[in-house]
Amino acid sequence: MDYNFREIEKKWQAYWAENKTYKATEDPSRPPFYVLDMFPYPSGAGLHVGHPLGYIASDIFSRYKRLKGFNVLHPMGYDAFGLPAEQYAIQHGIHPAVTTTKNIDRYRSQMDRIGFSYDWDREVRTCDPSYYKWTQWAFIKMFESYYDTALDKAQPISALVSAFEKNGTEGVNAACGEELSFTAEQWNAYSEKEKSEVLMNYRIAYQGSTSVNWCPALSTVLANDEVKDGLSVRGGFPVEQKKMTQWQLRVSAYAERLLNSLDSLEWTDSLKEMQRNWIGRSYGTEVVFKVETGDKTTDVTIFTTRVDTIFGVTFMVLAPESELTPLLTTPDRKAEVDEYLSYVKKKTERERIAQTKTVTGVFSGSYGINPLTGEKVPVWISEYVLSGYGTGAIMAVPAHDSRDYAFAKKFSLPIVPIIEGCDVSEESFDAKDGIMCNSGFLNGLTVKEAIPAAMDYVESKGIGHRKVNYRLRDAIFSRQRYWGEPFPIYYKDGIPTPLPEDKLPLTLPEIDQYKPTDSQEPPLARAKDWTYEGYPLETSTMPGFAGSSAYYLRYMDPHNDSALVSPEADNYWRHVDLYVGGTEHATGHLIYSRFWNKFLFDLGYVCEDEPFRKLINQGMIQGRSNFVYRIKGTENQYVSYGLKDQYDTQEIHVDVNIVTNDVLDTEAFKKWMPEYANAEFILEDGKYICGSAVEKMSKSMYNVVNPDVICDTYGADTLRLYEMFLGPVEQSKPWDTKGIDGVNRFLRKFWRLFYDGDKFIVNDAKPSAAELKTLHKLIGKEQADIEAFSYNTTISAFMIAVNDLTEKGCHSREILSPMVILLSPFAPHVAEELWHDLGNTTSVTDASFPEYIEAYTVEDSCTYAVSFNGKMRFTVDLPKSMAPADVETHVRSLEQTAKYVADMNIVKVIVVPGKIVNIVLKK
RNA sequence: GCGGGUGUGUUGAAAUUGGUAGACAAGCCAGACUUAGGAUCUGGUGCCUUCGGCGUAUGGGUUCGAGUCCCUUCACCCGCACCA
């Protein structure tokens, strides 16, 4: 029987499904291990070979951990709400659920062919009402909570209400939008509506008016991480800034905790760094400047990280959008300021980003007073100051800040250096070193000493205080779209009110069209009876990250009707031990999930503060495109790559599936598209060679390689091995089918250890020491490599072992049986087949990982005495098997060393296969 | 501009703490068996050469010894980007 992968793979996939081989059940007698893939958005294009890379890697790890005796939870599901299905619905009138289900089915069948060990009984879909019930539930919990900054955790909003009733805002420590101050009497006198508005300032899920990313083409708002370079990540449409009232999540309250607990995670440094940058903690000082506008005076608070440079302030700058801007504009400057404001407002986000180098601004007419020097400085308005960060106002120190410097140069404002010996004639001196000068009491201090000294001074004078700022903003949580979770909120006399828990899930209503209404209301406004007890329901829906923020918890207990996850299940699985997915989620999903989890942790619904212990980022697989070269001026004549320089040619993408090792299948090319039917070729060496380039894998480049096709020609096990053999999982690389034969050959070679034609040739011969050594070397290597996620070297080690056993003619059961187990994580179908052929009746998955016996792998060594200048200087341990000539070579190579160290009284040089591992010196 | 990372044959890539660089594959060359093969097997394959020498982007340093550690320069990739 030859290695017939088609039959084998079909057979065992059916067997696994039927026997529920990979079903996970909570079992306190075995240690749990949770391996998770980032679940996919099921797009219409299906999977290409890049998608399964991470899934294969995590599947190998899961199977390995099972063999090691762990109870492995390895689930899969779908992030099923999303824009593409909805855009399709708008254009074709087909319900997004229909498109989504169809795409999911296709994903499932593609995944099934690869032979993953998922427990499909735990599948979740974010668009399923029984799933999004818990997304809505969490939202209500957030709505009914506030963040207590003293306890540093979320608390029920009722606690805040009773505090207000007793003492007003006195003694309240709560994260909020703006600092409010009122007494208990005032609070108690507020109307319901007023109370609701006050509480919105504190709720973790709240409605607030801010400047948001508005995407007109998608007619929805977007979160910061959904916008890149001023364009929407989905679709690439322009985005503008707009002030709107939106649901938001107070993620900023968790900034410090999100930052601090990064240290405890086994993530890559680059990913942690990305999150640190995104959170953007900055420690500085808020200082109050009095600003004179005509004869009235206003307090303007600025934020700076360099309060030590305050003696170098020569002007101040306000953000155009700051509410202070109109207040501080003098009547004579009003016309010019208004003109500037409208100029700024007209700019799209994209233009603003593109023009960061051009300096613009306008003088307000007011003057600020430096609280330390009493000096008067002009107050300018410029777009380089952002309203959303700090206080929206800065003190400008052009000598020591490059942005202020550029501004000062442009508008001819004075530049006063306050660090000794620095040259600011060409550029500012931003570095934090040097000795202070021109700075009153700070003179003579180093910059590093001056910063805390200036902070102390400012605080002691009561003109400012230390302050930590974060770049992280609250997440905009509503979308004016149809295909998302409805908010479980209704407006009772205009007051946003959550639905009672037993009314969840609030299911998405049917509507006739999926686009916004004519009056620009979200699509849900089209729904009939979109009310609760006669009150209108919220018409926006939740964003994509809502459903993906806690899905890993739902997998622990996916069918639970009365809780997101039962305490028993949560306590058993606890957290994701290994999470595999792409870096693109670094500042989106991976921040939101951590926030969401911390919130649930605060409320006691989950037992761990951090959801993802270890995280591996798999690299992206790019496409490798092929080209043919049409000779210009001809209809259909193509010249091979090597000869193209002799002609004037035009490069044309050709389907990579009709190209093998850059050689074009000319007949297939003629059939590929009608216009190529009578193509003529100028060949080199009888072949048509194509050009190639690395590009994104996409339909339009004809470079998409479908895993199904690979499974058809080579089998799933070959695909799995090849994707891993390509290189380190974390690394991005172009897909190139060249070389897949190598791993396919390896599998056939492995097979031939068991079968000679139809004859099963495994015997009960006692293995030789050399054979045992081969086996145990592999066990040791595989163990170490898999734990380190280094699969490509494991596979190499496997190839070496199989070549070795083939050469030795080893067919011993005692060797081959463990070999099958070792192979099973990588090539489960082959392993399963051979495992049963060896006479086993249970799945190879239930076997245990063979024990590694070091004794077999230790090289027998023999000690050589090395003499130098007639005197014995040291001894060398070399393998017994080493030929005398090789020994001499090795010893000779030590001569040089010996010359240097002879005087150092060497006692012994121990060489294990040729390496000096230890030089023992006489004391 | 700031932060992080990577540079090794024709190609994908290996190389415990510094210790025989290029394992394992792909490609290529030669041969064997075949009616044939994109099957299988064997041998060769970093570069220059006669001994021998040179080789891990570049230039320097530490060391008996450097792909690995330190500094310089260059190239590429990723992230952030007026964050005060």
Image (cartoon, coloured by chain):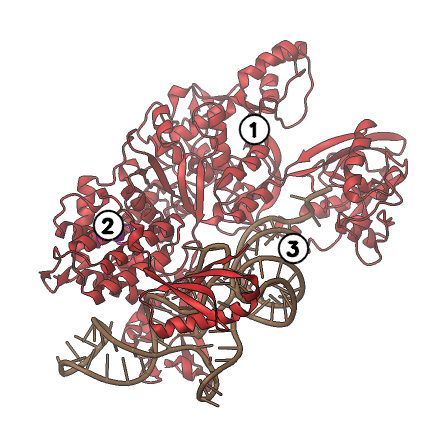
Nearest to N terminus: mark 1 or mark 2: 1
Q: Which chain is red?
A: A
Q: What color is chain B drawn in?
A: brown
Amino acid type of the residue tagged 1 in the rendering: Gln
Amino acid type of the residue tagged 2 in the rendering: Ile
Q: Main secondary structure of the magenta part?
A: helix
Residue A627 visible in rendering = no
Who is closer to the viewer here, A560 or A125?
A560
Which dot marks residue A821?
2
- Whether tag 1 and tag 2 are in contact, CB under 8 A, the answer is no
Q: Position of residue A228 (x, y in %)?
A: 56, 49
Residue A823 magenta: yes
Do tags 3 and 1 sit on the same chain? yes
Which dot marks residue A354?
3
Q: Position of residue A123 (x, y in %)?
A: 31, 38
Which dot marks residue A800?
none
Q: Report the chain holding disc 3.
A: A
Please provide the residue range marked out in magenta: A820-830
Residue A883 magenta: no
Q: Residue at the location (12% across, 49% down)?
A: A839
| Other-residue count near label 2 (Cα within 10 Å), few / some / many at <14 / 14–19 / ≥20 | many
- In the figure, is residue A13 to the left or right of B6? left
Q: Position of residue A590 (x, y in %)?
A: 48, 41
Q: Quote the CA–CA distance across marks 1 and 2.
A: 56 Å
- In the figure, is residue A884 to the left or right of A395? left
Who is closer to the viewer here, A113 or A140?
A113
Which dot marks residue A207?
1
| Other-residue count near label 1 (Cα within 10 Å), few / some / many at <14 / 14–19 / ≥20 | many
Do tags 1 and 2 sit on the same chain? yes
Who is closer to the viewer here, A555 or A855?
A855
